[in-house]
Amino acid sequence: MMDAVIAIPALNPDDRLVSLVDELHGRGFTRFIVVDDGSAPEHQEAFEALKRRGVRVVHHPQNLGKGSAIKTAIAQMRFAYPDADCLVTMDADGQHLPKDVVRVCREAQEHPESLVLGTRNLGGRNVPLRSRLGNGFSALYFKMDTGVSCPDTQTGLRAIPRPLLQLAMRTRGTRYDYEMNFLTAVAKRGCDIRMVPVHTVYQRGNAGSHFQTVRDSALIYRQFIRFTGSSLACSAVDLAMFALITAILGLDTAALVAVATVVARMLSGALNFELNRSWSFADSGSRKGPADAQAIRYGILFVAQMLASMGLVTMLSFLPLPLVVVKVLVDGSLFFVSHFIQKNWVFKAKARGMQPLVLEGGAHVREARAA
């Protein structure tokens, strides 16, 4: 077996964690880092049992999140196992079978510079509906954002090669949002991502999962939620300004509508630009880019989106639907596309280059620095 380090973030585990480590040890793995992410006192026996087996256990004094636990494991790996080929992350709740861990490690051994994912078949009947819907949306969002197809973006079974450790450490996020952020960062840098089919295991309806649907989904899709809020607020401003202008100007109907529409749209567009630059995409470094260049790109998108809306509504007017319904469908689709164009073009932060990193033990590698 390759010199892989198995990292297992754990929160309130039971004896399945100890059995998992024993099974992995029986398959040739000897290097483990288990991160106790703030588990309650009554769950400490599992960690003590692992310590008696010689497993390196690191304790967080309080729950910091899965992302923080993975970063702790990377830091520990650099200190304790500086010669390791890669870090293999997996869950503590029994979702990953030891034989699948072996398959992922073999793929990582054959492709030492690739990120290897253990991908599940999430269309089966044994997969909870919440998980099927969540992963389906996540895969679509990831495809539109990066152009890379990945059927299981939420998998916790990953082999992170040594050249990507620096990027993994600098990726934003401390909880479940971290995994999506890291996968996105790897894809956008053009790094190779390989996918190994693994078994889909959901014990007791996935009752052991610590994923909190509302809180963690809000973290994962924070940019899109902010973008939606910004757009809704600006739509309200657009409508209010249109109503105000039509109420105070004494013009013919055609001229009044034209003037009110243009002025209201320009004001709401300017507000939308500023909100998206300073808030919606702030996590991606939008405020660090030159505002004038961003404004020009935003203006181009603004005009293109308006023309596309008019053109598509006209083209689809033959459908047996009210015209307003057609417009809602067209503008809804353009809204979704606009999010990714603004994220990846209008407000895209300039990536910083490659930086040499000195690891413990004196080894030098070239690794990507997070933007």
Image (tube, rainbow, N blue to C red):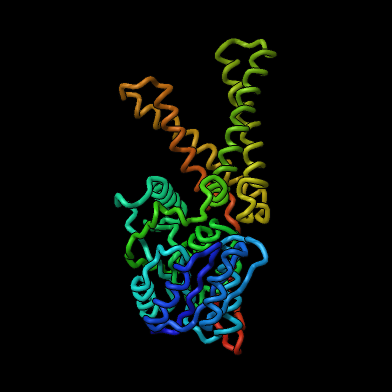
State the residue lying farthest toward the right: 248
Residue 205 is situated, as x and y percent measured from the top left of the image, at: 39, 51
Residue 342 position (above or below residue 63): above
Residue 103 is situated, as x and y percent measured from the top left of the image, at: 34, 74
Image position of 185 (left or right of 281): left
Question: Quarter holding the N terminus?
Answer: bottom left
Residue 365 is situated, as x and y percent measured from the top left of the image, at: 55, 82
Residue 90 position (above or below residue 316): below
Residue 196 is situated, as x and y percent measured from the top left of the image, at: 34, 67
Q: Nearer the viewer, residue 247 or 163?
A: 163
Residue 34 position (above or below residue 139): below
State the residue lying farthest toward the bottom: 362
Q: Nearer the viewer, residue 286 or 208?
A: 208
Image position of 98 (left or right of 39): left
The quarter of the displayed image where residue 362 is located: bottom right
Q: Nearer the viewer, residue 368 or 22?
A: 22
Q: Is residue 13 visible?
A: yes
Residue, x 54% and y 56% (percent of image)? 177
The quarter of the displayed image where residue 29 is located: bottom left
Residue, x 41% and y 50% (percent of image)? 131
